[in-house]
Amino acid sequence: MTTPSPRRQARTKTARVLRTERLSPALVRVVLTDVDGLAEIEHSDSYLKLLFPREGVTYPEPFDVAAIRESMPREQWPHSRTYTVRGWDGAELWIDFVVHGDRGVAGPWALKAQPGDLLHFAGPGGAYTPDPEADWHLLAGDESAWPAIAASLEALPEGARAEVLVEVDGPEDEQPAPVPVRWLHRSAGQRVAAAVRELEFPPGRVHAFVHGEAGMVKELRGHLRLERGIPRADLSISGYWRIGSDEDGWQAGKAEWNRTVEQEQES
């Protein structure tokens, strides 16, 4: 029997699907209501651990991931997928899903979600909010980072300067934004890592948020820390996903991958 850690003791929360919205070919918004137990969202990158039951497995009621992990074998534990809270007003909770047809777990669920469907989750976590004292802000990433970037743009102080670079498949995936965004089209060979490297940085202290595919993050972590000289405290940077790996595999090795990258770039 596995001894539960304090993190596993967090109460499993539930919400009910109210509606879905197709924002672009690659993005589906699921709007949830009847949200049970979700406190105020503190950070613009706040995220939830969404819990998806495995096909063919019967879970005890009430659905409680801590109890499931204590009493059931690991191969029957629900799939856990991490998603940023796009919006939460106390009545409706918005979560935007990148979808690729029937690939994965969360994307197919979002495509098929119907009003009344239940979603179990844990959280929130998060750590980043734009610093109002910064001279300017750099926000860069891909589709997976867009919900956090969009929420961060809405949290910027009025008149704040922001350089925003977002990599998507093509122009059909661009989204409305409260400030100008430089949309980079993967189909045209435009990549966010190259664009950040070529960016002329404005003067003053920058507060940076760079998230997305792990390879891109690795390249830009070194560039921003070593070549641009951004202090660690002013840089929120992490891989949300990795090419060739699902979230189970990526999360299992993410901490070690981050340690290795930091050691390589600090040596």
Image (cartoon, grey):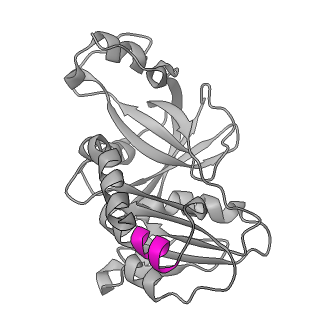
- The residue closer to the viewer here, 157 or 233, is 233
Most foreground residue, 226 or 20: 226
Residue 236 placed where, x, y %? 53, 59
User: Residue 132's spot in the image, x, y percent?
Assistant: 76, 64
Percent of width and height locating residue 263: 34, 59
Which residue corresponds to the image point at 45% horizontal and 68% vertical from the top-left? 141
The residue lying at 41 percent from left, 77 percent from top is 192
Q: Residue furthest front?
A: 267
Residue 105, quarter of the rendered image: top left
Label the magenta part by its dominant secondary structure.
helix
Give the quadrant of the C terminus.
bottom left
The answer to whether residue 141 is magenta is no
Question: Where 110 sits versus 1, above or below?
Answer: below
Is residue 25 visible in the rendered image? The answer is: no
Provide the residue span drawn in magenta.
220-228
Q: Residue at x 51, y 79 (%)?
A: 228
Q: Is residue 28 left or right of residue 255?
A: right
| Residue 223 is a magenta residue | yes
- The residue sitting at 70% across, 78% down in the picture is 161
Q: Quadrant of residue 241?
A: bottom left
Q: Quadrant of residue 188?
A: bottom left
Is the residue 90 above or below the residue 28 in the image? above
Above/below status of 189 relative to 159:
below
Foreground residue among 145 and 233: 233
Q: Position of residue 258 (x, y in %)?
A: 35, 53
- Residue placed most toward the observer, 155 or 215: 215
